[in-house]
């Protein structure tokens, strides 16, 4: 297998981009990635474009978005296809792009992940996102993703002693990082006083799905992120000015569609298996990882994922958060970008956005105050469904 | 002769499935038995037994959901995951005053027209 590296990255600001066309949003991030790689003028030499998107048909009443992006970027006749894997569509698109390059079928692949969710109201958007649940046994009941997040949080609290204040500490940490990230949806810090300890906390930080509160739940965002992948063992790798950041490991795994059918609903088996496969592929273990981007659509998931990937013992991760071990200056910074909580979660873009953050950190290009000191390996976990289709990625600075 | 039975009131039910070959039970319906690999024909259910999933159950997890999706004109709804005595589990709505993990409940089925499309049958778990 050929080695695969990232030579260009692009990212829109996340937020409310509902006045823009989805294809324009994706093309903006993609052209940024091409400019970063110094390859904008030669874009028709790209062998393949892979687009990650979850639900443009629902949110934007638009299908075949890969064709739309190609035309907007004047890239015909470059082949382009769409990859859909719920909120893990972005990382799945990277995985398919990796497979194309590693197999030798392509040398240069452009991967774009994007979503515009805010053309519809939050009421409608919640309904659209819920369509990824089991249609008969979950969706029909009226359940939503925050509903499962709430139930998962309560199970974890009752088993391990996690408190609502612990969840608020995660929001404070991630907002501190997101406030410094130029791409983040919510570039504002929050204090533990405002969202947990103070007299107004119950008003500021209301319940969404008990015991999950607003500051334990990601915002609904629009945006896109893109990466240019290259075969590092091909002469074409010399076409690019930037030194590649190598994709050392990338793998995915699945779990039961119905959450209630998991033997232990607190175990995220797909996360564990995807991470183990990515570690094996990279020849690494959890202790080698310098920092991580973990899919905190609900704050509890940052904790549960950090345990499944082997950073902490089961039921102990929140103790590390209390000690500041996962803060930007801690021994293992997690969600240096602000995570989904502060940076935002345009579902189809999230995996590519996490990968862009890995590259920015490994290049040393993150903003002052949120740059990890000399990182070697970055890990990202992109969580599809309620953990039923998960992608893990490990990037390396060689 | 007119068949008036089609006008009879039909009580809402939710079906579970049992593989006749090995006896493994499922909810919701599988296509292949995980134990003996028998395939279920979704049209005839040949070689599969169906039964109503209802009755006593235990609450495993619950939440009060405040941001309901489109179609729900309510302030909030309670949801839970339960386990039945035969080991099957299900997700559904919860109608109890003070929910608590581990409490004994009884599963009932009601018709709901809140989701888009045709009315559907939903679990409502109530105080035993």
Image (cartoon, coloured by chain):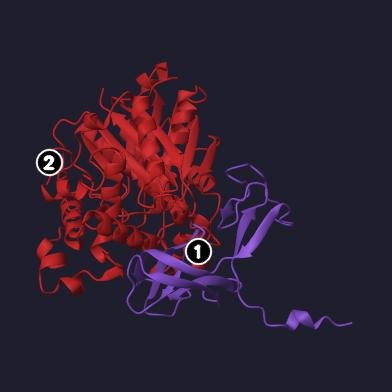
Q: Is residue B12 above or below residue A386?
A: below
Q: How far from the left and from the top, in percent, is residue A267?
A: 36, 47
Residue A73 seen in the current view: no
Of residues A41 and A64, the one nearer the viewer is: A64
Which quadrant does the C terminus of chain A fall into? top left
Residue A312 seen in the current view: yes
Read off the residue under disc 2: A330
Q: Which chain is purple?
A: B
Which quadrant does the N terminus of chain A fall into? top left
Q: Residue at x 16, y 49 (%)?
A: A319
Q: Is B74 displayed left or right of A303 in the figure?
A: right
Q: Residue at x 16, y 56 (%)?
A: A169
Instruction: Measure how far apart labels 2 and 1 are at the Cα level.
Output: 40 Å
Label 2 resides on the chain identified as A
Read off the residue under disc 1: A139
* SS at badge 2: loop
């Amino acid at each position: 297998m050929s080695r695969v590296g990232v030579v260009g990255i692009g990212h829109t600001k996340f937020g409310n981009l509902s006045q823009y066309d989805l294809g324009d949003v994706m093309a903006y991030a993609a052209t940024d990635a091409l400019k970063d790689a110094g390859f904008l003028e030669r874009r028709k030499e790209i062998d393949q474009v892979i687009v990650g998107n979850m639900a443009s048909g629902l949110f934007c009443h638009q299908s075949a978005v890969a064709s739309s992006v190609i035309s907007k970027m004047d890239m015909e006749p470059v082949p382009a296809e769409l990859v859909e894997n719920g909120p893990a569509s972005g990382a799945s698109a990277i995985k398919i792009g990796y497979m194309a390059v590693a197999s030798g079928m392509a040398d240069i692949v452009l991967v774009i992940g994007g979503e515009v969710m805010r053309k519809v109201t939050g009421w409608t958007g919640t309904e659209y996102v819920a369509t990824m649940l089991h249609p008969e046994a979950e969706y029909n009941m009226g359940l939503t993703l925050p509903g499962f997040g709430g139930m998962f949080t309560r199970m974890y609290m009752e088993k391990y002693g996690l408190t609502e204040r612990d969840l608020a500490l995660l929001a404070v940490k991630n907002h501190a990082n997101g406030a410094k990230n130029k791409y983040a949806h919510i570039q504002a810090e929050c204090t533990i006083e405002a969202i947990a300890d103070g007299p107004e906390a119950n008003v500021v930080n209301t319940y969404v799905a008990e015991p999950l509160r607003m500051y334990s739940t990601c915002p609904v965002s629009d945006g896109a992120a893109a990466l240019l992948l290259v075969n590092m063992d091909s002469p074409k790798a010399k076409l690019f000015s930037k030194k590649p950041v190598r994709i050392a490991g990338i793998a995915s795994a699945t779990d039961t569609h119905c959450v209630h059918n998991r033997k232990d609903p607190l175990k995220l088996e797909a996360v564990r298996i995807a991470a183990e496969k990515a570690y094996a592929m990279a020849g690494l273990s959890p202790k080698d990882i310098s920092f991580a981007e973990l899919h905190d659509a609900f704050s509890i998931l940052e904790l549960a994922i950090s345990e499944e990937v082997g950073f902490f013992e089961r039921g102990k991760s929140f103790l590390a958060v209390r000690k500041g071990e996962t803060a930007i200056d801690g021994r293992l910074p997690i969600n240096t970008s602000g995570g989904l909580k502060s940076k935002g979660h345009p579902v189809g873009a999230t995996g590519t956005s996490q990968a862009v953050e890995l590259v920015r950190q490994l290049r040393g290009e993150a903003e002052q105050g949120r740059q990890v000191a000399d990182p070697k390996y970055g890990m990202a976990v992109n969580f599809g469904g309620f953990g039923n289709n998960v992608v893990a990625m490990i990037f390396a600075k060689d | 002769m007119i068949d008036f039975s089609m006008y009879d009131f039909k009580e809402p039910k939710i079906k579970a499935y049992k593989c006749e070959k090995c006896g493994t039970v499922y909810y919701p319906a599988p296509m292949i038995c995980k134990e003996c690999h028998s395939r279920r024909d979704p049209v005839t259910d040949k070689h599969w037994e169906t039964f109503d999933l209802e009755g006593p159950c235990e609450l495993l997890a619950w939440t009060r959901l405040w941001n309901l999706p489109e179609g729900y004109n309510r302030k909030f709804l309670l949801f839970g995951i339960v386990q039945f005595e035969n080991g099957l589990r299900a997700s559904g709505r919860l109608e109890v005053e003070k929910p608590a993990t581990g409490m004994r409940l009884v599963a009932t089925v009601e018709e709901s027209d809140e989701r888009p499309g045709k009315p559907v049958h939903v679990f409502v778990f109530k105080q035993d």
